[in-house]
Image: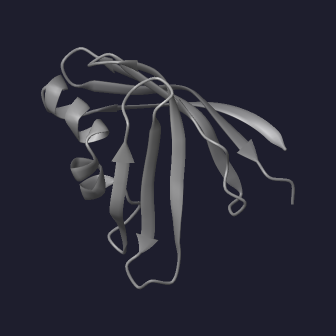
Amino acid sequence: MTNQQITIATTIAAPIERVWEAYTTPGDITQWNFASDDWCCPSAEADLKVGGGYKARMEAKDGSFGFDFEAVYEEVEPYKAIAFRHEPRAQGAYDLRSCRQRYEGDDHIRCRDAELHRHAA
């Protein structure tokens, strides 16, 4: 397995309180947490505290495939930062092992120190 570190940044035009809510509230997570329009996120759980669990179910709308993304929060600083770590799924060429989301200013989210692992072919 090869380790690779990436940084992703995005700007969201919304107050930081709304952005935080969208990333931490299960009802909001189910509205955006899918890769494309033919996927959905029928359920999500977030016990937003250090050591608390995160779980989101992702499924193809046609029922052909689905998986649970599960993680444990390692850092929770309201309106400032979230860090999580999870054990990878067996499927897929890459697995996200950890991510630290830093909320900056009024409308910025940065995912820092993301650790990707590539499976050997």
- Residue 57: where, in percent of width, then height? 43, 61
Q: Is residue 7 above or below residue 93?
A: above
Please name the residue shown 35% across and 63% down the image: 41
Please name the residue shown 29% across and 49% down the image: 29
| Model colouring | one colour
Q: Nearer the viewer, residue 77 or 102?
A: 77
Q: Is residue 64 above or below residue 66?
A: below
Q: Is residue 20 left or right of residue 93?
A: left
Quadrant, the C terminus? bottom right
Please name the residue shown 61% across and 40% down the image: 86
Can residue 101 be seen from the camera position used here? Answer: no
Q: Is residue 44 left or right of residue 22?
A: right
Q: Is residue 8 left or right of residue 115?
A: left
Q: Is residue 107 left or right of residue 118?
A: left
| Total labels drawn | 0
Please name the residue shown 44% across and 42% down the image: 54
Q: Is residue 30 above or below residue 42?
A: above
- Residue 80: where, in percent of width, then height? 32, 16
Q: Quadrant of residue 1?
A: top right
- Residue 42: where, in percent of width, then height? 33, 66
Q: Quadrant of residue 115?
A: top right
Q: Is residue 96 above or below residue 48?
A: below
- Residue 40: where, in percent of width, then height? 35, 68
Q: Quadrant of residue 36?
A: bottom left
Can residue 88 be seen from the camera position used here? Answer: yes
Q: Nearer the viewer, residue 53 or 95?
A: 53
Q: Nearer the viewer, residue 26 or 14?
A: 26
